């Protein structure tokens, strides 16, 4: 990965921050993309990396013009792109019947359209370098999770989109990885949207028992090197994906029973 040009969206926190730190450590040249420029600059300062090896571009991936600008700034500075990691994402937590439809639109704009926009503008350069497109997804892209209609829909859509990109470019040397970390200790649940679009501000899970962002970044890093098609992390994640292939109705009940036990589960008020 030395001197490879890597774009990471959602780079100001969580998995994106951990990936930034790891790729810098491995000698890559990194382009950080996130809405919070101040946080990215703070990360760069702490990394003590030369300015000719890192670039922060303020980017709202839900806006096409921002994504186009991200790719343009990358090419202006580094002249090529080897890896695009579509990591920017947002979650939500509410029953569909209680949900303001704008919440699903917002989640889709960031998780799905952000991936589409960035991949579209980076693709010519990735084909030139025979590089990698990575979608940081979730088990929610394999199995619908109750209380997460918008989140699951966005991840299912991401999977379908990236699978087609892979097949269309099968003979062109493009690598496409769909990475599903499982529940990870990051700020995605704290910033999850409630039924009216307001921030949840708390997590329903015990973050101390979850896989860390640093562990996830190591798995993604190795999967890119090995040019894997997909990775599913955690025992719970792997078993959910596997069992759902053969016993989908059984898994519906298992998933329901798992999520109804969450603190303040939206399922409790409805059943």
Image (tube, rainbow, N blue to C red):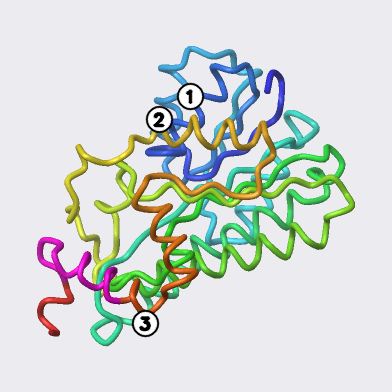
N-term mark: 2 or 3: 3
Residue 125 in which image quadrant: top right
Magenta residues: mostly which secondary structure? helix
User: Looking at the image, do the residues carrying marks 2 and 3 touch, with CB atoms under 8 Å apart?
Assistant: no
Q: Give the camera-side residue of 195 and 71.
A: 195
* Rendered view: 217 above or below 166: above
Q: CA distance from mark 1 to mark 3?
A: 36 Å
Q: Which residue is mark 1?
A: 21
Q: Which mark is residue 101?
A: 3
Closer to us: mark 2 or mark 3? 2
Q: Is residue 113 shown left or right of residue 93?
A: right
Q: Quadrant of the N terminus?
A: top right
Which residues make up the magenta segment?
253-265
User: Looking at the image, do the residues carrying marks 1 and 3 touch, with CB atoms under 8 Å apart?
Assistant: no
N-term mark: 1 or 2: 1
Residue 3 in the image, given as x and y percentages of width and height: 71, 20
* Rendered view: 264 above or below 33: below
How many numbered circles does the render carry?
Answer: 3
Residue 43 in the image, given as x and y percentages of width and height: 42, 25
Q: CA distance from mark 1 to mark 2?
A: 9 Å
Q: Give the camera-side residue of 226 and 91.
A: 226
Looking at the rendered structure, the secondary structure element under dot 3 is: helix
257 part of magenta stretch: yes
Looking at the rendered structure, the secondary structure element under dot 1 is: helix
N-term mark: 1 or 3: 1
Closer to us: mark 1 or mark 2? 2
Q: Is residue 165 shown left or right of residue 25?
A: right
User: Looking at the image, do the residues carrying marks 1 and 2 touch, with CB atoms under 8 Å apart?
Assistant: yes
Q: Residues within 10 Å of mark 1 (few under 14, many from 20)?
A: many
Q: Which residue is mark 2?
A: 214
């Amino acid at each position: 990965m030395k001197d490879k040009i890597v774009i990471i969206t959602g780079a100001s926190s969580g998995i994106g921050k951990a990936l930034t730190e790891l790729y810098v450590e491995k000698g890559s040249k990194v382009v950080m993309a996130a809405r919070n420029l101040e946080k990215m600059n703070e990360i760069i300062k702490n990394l003590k990396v030369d300015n000719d090896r890192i670039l922060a571009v303020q980017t709202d991936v839900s806006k096409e013009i921002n994504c186009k600008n991200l790719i343009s700034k990358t090419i202006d500075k580094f002249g090529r792109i080897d890896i695009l990691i579509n990591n920017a994402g947002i979650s939500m937590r509410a029953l569909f019947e209680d949900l303001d439809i704008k919440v699903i639109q917002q989640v889709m704009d960031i998780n799905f359209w952000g991936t589409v926009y960035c991949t579209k503008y980076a693709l010519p350069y990735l084909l030139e370098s025979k590089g990698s497109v990575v979608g940081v997804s979730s088990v929610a892209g394999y199995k619908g999770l109750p209380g997460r209609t918008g989140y699951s829909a966005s991840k299912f859509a991401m999977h379908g989109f990236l699978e087609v990109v892979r097949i269309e470019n099968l003979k062109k040397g493009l690598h496409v990885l769909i990475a599903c970390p499982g529940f990870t200790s990051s700020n995605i649940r704290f910033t999850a949207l409630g039924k009216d679009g307001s921030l949840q501000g708390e997590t329903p899970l015990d973050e101390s028992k979850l896989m860390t962002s640093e562990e996830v970044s190591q798995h993604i890093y190795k999967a890119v090197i090995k040019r894997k098609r997909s990775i599913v992390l955690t025992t719970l994640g792997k078993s959910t994906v596997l069992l759902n292939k053969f016993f989908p109705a059984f898994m519906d009940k298992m998933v329901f029973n798992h999520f109804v036990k969450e603190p303040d589960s939206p399922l409790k008020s409805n059943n």
